[in-house]
Image: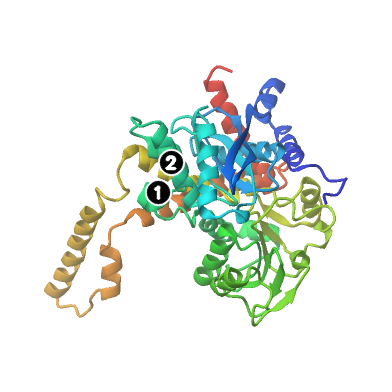
Amino acid sequence: MQNAKEPSFRESVDIMFNRAVDKIDLPLGMKEKIRVCNATYTVRFGVRLRGEVKTFVGYRSVHSEHMEPVKGGIRYADTVNQDEVEALAALMTYKCALVDTPFGGSKGGLCIDPRQYDEHELEQITRRFAYELIKRDLIHPSQNVPAPDMGTGEREMAWMADQYARMNTTDINARACVTGKPLNAGGIAGRVEATGRGVQYALREFFRSPDDLKKAGLSGSLDGKRVIIQGLGNVGYHAAKFLAEEDGCKIISIIERDGGIHSADGLNPDDVLAHIREHGGVKGFAGATYTEDGVALLEEDCDILVPAALEGVIHIDNAARIKAPLIIEAANGPVTSNADAILREKGCVIIPDMYANAGGVTVSYFEWVKNLSHIRFGRMQRREQEARNMLIVNELERLSEAMGDTWSLTENFKAKYMQGAGELELVRSGLDDTMRGALQSMRTLWHEREDVTDLRMAAYLVSIEKVAASYRAKGL
């Protein structure tokens, strides 16, 4: 139960917004226009299931249309409510502005526990929900483009895209109505892993800056850093996997619904995920210490804490006991505004959610562009790039032979150098560039302005300025 002293998720977002916007010289009316949610549509629809009609409640909120289409995921959870959806829509506005994706902010949710229904029932529910949104242009390639969120994935997006195509048979851009689709339904390589990959790229960019590390009291590289992951869903799993396998991090704790596990020697995310799928939780995982009170592991000593599940897991009651010098918010709103103030006072550095988990919307943008252009990234230039690189390699080897030198390029180097970039490589390159650029824009304010005390404030400042500039260009 939420502490009575804690603001709601929506109120936390507004508190953090107000804290930053006070640093910007904007008319009061413009500040309020950016803060408020433009519209929220509530739908109640019935589906005949198991011999009776069951009524479901869903939401689609549009926070800001300073750019269109608006963008934001649709989540399935039995805790979904209007306040949560509106708070998430606001975060999407700021997130898209921060990472320069040309979208406004939106969000959707269906109050349902998807684990209670089989695949056929979920398809019926999803198609009916999509129908209610589509006929009001709340799913549309040029107006409102959903994506997966908690409780949804490629499967649900494919159903929604197909429902849109059935209702708009002459729309040549129908596939662009949602993102996060399977590859064979107009998706893009690298989308499933995108948010977790973005978390990895964000940490890499943070660790490139000695000044950033100094603020967090850290040093060196990611190699060997002790990491705690809260939530081994899509985002948490991919972040843990990439950090462990590619950057040498040690995943010492993983927290899930049924508790948490800890191992000072490190946990293999693939093995833990396989155990969860087989047994429904982390309890009983071999080679680790299990604790039923998994949330308590948030307070364990580590270098990096990655909350990657629900909002509000770090709050007024446990913030003072958090030992991690660096928190990266892979989930939306995992730190309440009260906890944020406590952690800042302690000197903890927080890489905020609107930046840290922006990998999903960034790659969704690439998918949307792919759908509108009707061509796979890399298809036109990949082989031409290979041919040019081969010319260089061949010429270098000819010159070496002509000069009587004994050196030669290794076969491994030649294979990697001559390989042209395909869709996955281009997506990862674009995501890496986006995450670097966004943190650099935040970092400039963080280090150069005395009144900008943390990265969250810097992120809001960058975002609000961009949204305000868009509204001014519209004549507001």
Q: Which residue is disc 1 drawn over?
A: 187
At label 1, counting other C-alpha atoms closer than 10 Å, the crowd grade (few under 14, some 14-19, many 20 or more) is many
Which residue is the extreme one toward the front?
51
Q: Any mark on residue 161, and which?
A: 2
Between residues 340 and 290, which one lies in front from this camera angle? 290
Visible in this render: residue 359?
Answer: no
Q: List x then y, in percent, for residue 88.
A: 64, 41
Tell me which amino acid carries mark 2: Ala
Q: Does residue 466 appear left or right of residue 282 in this picture?
A: left
Residue at image location 54% in from the left, 49% down from the top: 122
Q: Answer above or below: position of 213 versus 161.
A: below
Q: Quadrant of residue 202?
A: bottom right
Residue at image location 16% in from the left, 65% down from the top: 395
Q: Does residue 14 appear left or right of residue 50 in this picture?
A: right
Q: How many marks?
A: 2
Q: List x then y, in percent, for residue 446.
A: 66, 46
Q: Answer above or below: position of 339 versus 445.
A: below
User: Reading the chain from its start, which is encountered first: label 2 or label 1?
Assistant: 2
Assign a secondary structure to mark 1. loop
Residue at image location 53% in from the left, 62% down from the top: 238
Q: List x then y, in percent, for residue 271.
A: 56, 75
Q: Does residue 9 appear left or right of residue 220 in this picture?
A: right
